[in-house]
Amino acid sequence: MDNVYSCFFSDMGFLNVAISLIIGISTLIMIRIFYVIYWSSKPRYSKPPGPLTTLIVLGSGGHTAEMLNLLAVMQMDRFKPRYYIAAATDDMSLQKARVLEDSLIKKAEVEVVGTSHFLQIYRSREVGQSYVTSVGTTLIALTHALWLMIKIRPQVILCNGPGTCIPLCVIAFFFKVLGIRWSSIFYVESIARVRRLSLSGLLLYKLRMVDQLFVQWPQLKSKYPRANYVGRLM
């Protein structure tokens, strides 16, 4: 009987220790998440840093055109090397990005090897794909996104709406929480979004994963107060 009681209390003691560890680790993770959320909205550098490894997410349709127009007025020498990422089925966006990079080379009259890279990422779900089969493709897409983020380790992420940016931004956020890499995420909402954010923008805004979210219409700033109104960029 004594052995039964001793085993029982031993098991209870182990269970209490396990529960205490789980609570302690969960508390530390929550503190770290709040820390990351707080500091993500603060200036990262006190003075202009050197060139920053930059990940640029492109999307089909108007997303790529808007992003390339934005890049055309930026000081591109401060953002290099540049990694352009588009969906695996979106060859046109990467072609347009190559045209932009070629124009930068001609303007500088010198080619810098390794300044720009062009990559593709699997989609979580194709248009018309069933939700059942999308479970498997979503897992594949997340694994691929994780591999790309480990490979690139960007300091800056620029995106403006395509769904392909979500797994990359989520992984970047958790990299911050785990102390692996601090990537500043900048999201520029499409000019076509006048009254409400896109699904991608809304997710990043509500989950507080984005460092800065920019909108191009004042009514969006009124509806989403943490957003930054910058006027029409196009």
Image (cartoon, rainbow, N blue to C red):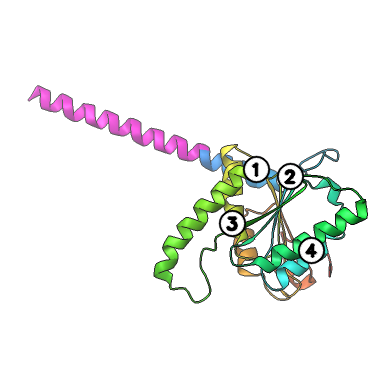
Taking the spot 84% from the left edge, 51% from the top edge, the residue there is 76
Q: What residue type is labelled 4?
A: Leu
> Which region is colored magenta?
1-28
The residue beneath circle 4 is 68
- Closer to the eye: label 3 or 1: 1
> Which comes before the other along the chain, label 1 or label 2?
2
Q: Do the residues labelled 4 and 1 touch (CB within 8 Å)?
A: no
Q: Do the residues labelled 3 and 4 touch (CB within 8 Å)?
A: no
Place of residue 186 in the rendered image (x, y in percent of width and height, measured from the top left):
72, 55
- Category of crowding for the residue at label 4, using alpha-carbon neighbours closer than 10 angstroms: few (below 14), some (14–19), many (at least 20): some
61 left or right of 99 in image: left
Q: Which amino acid does label 1 sit on?
A: Arg
The residue beneath circle 1 is 153
> Which comes before the other along the chain, label 3 or label 1?
1
Using the numbered discs, state the Cα–Cα distance from disc 1 to disc 2 in whole angstroms: 8 Å
> Which comes before the other along the chain, label 3 or label 2?
2
234 left or right of 181 in image: right
The residue beneath circle 2 is 53
Using the numbered discs, state the Cα–Cα distance from disc 3 to disc 1 in whole angstroms: 22 Å
Using the numbered discs, state the Cα–Cα distance from disc 3 to disc 4 in whole angstroms: 27 Å
Nearer to us in this view, 43 or 222: 43
- Kind of element beneath mark 1: loop
Q: What residue type is labelled 3?
A: Leu
The residue beneath circle 3 is 207
Task: Indicate which disc residue 233 carries.
Answer: none
Using the numbered discs, state the Cα–Cα distance from disc 3 to disc 2 in whole angstroms: 24 Å
- Kind of element beneath mark 2: loop
| Number of marks present in the image shown | 4
- Kind of element beneath mark 4: helix
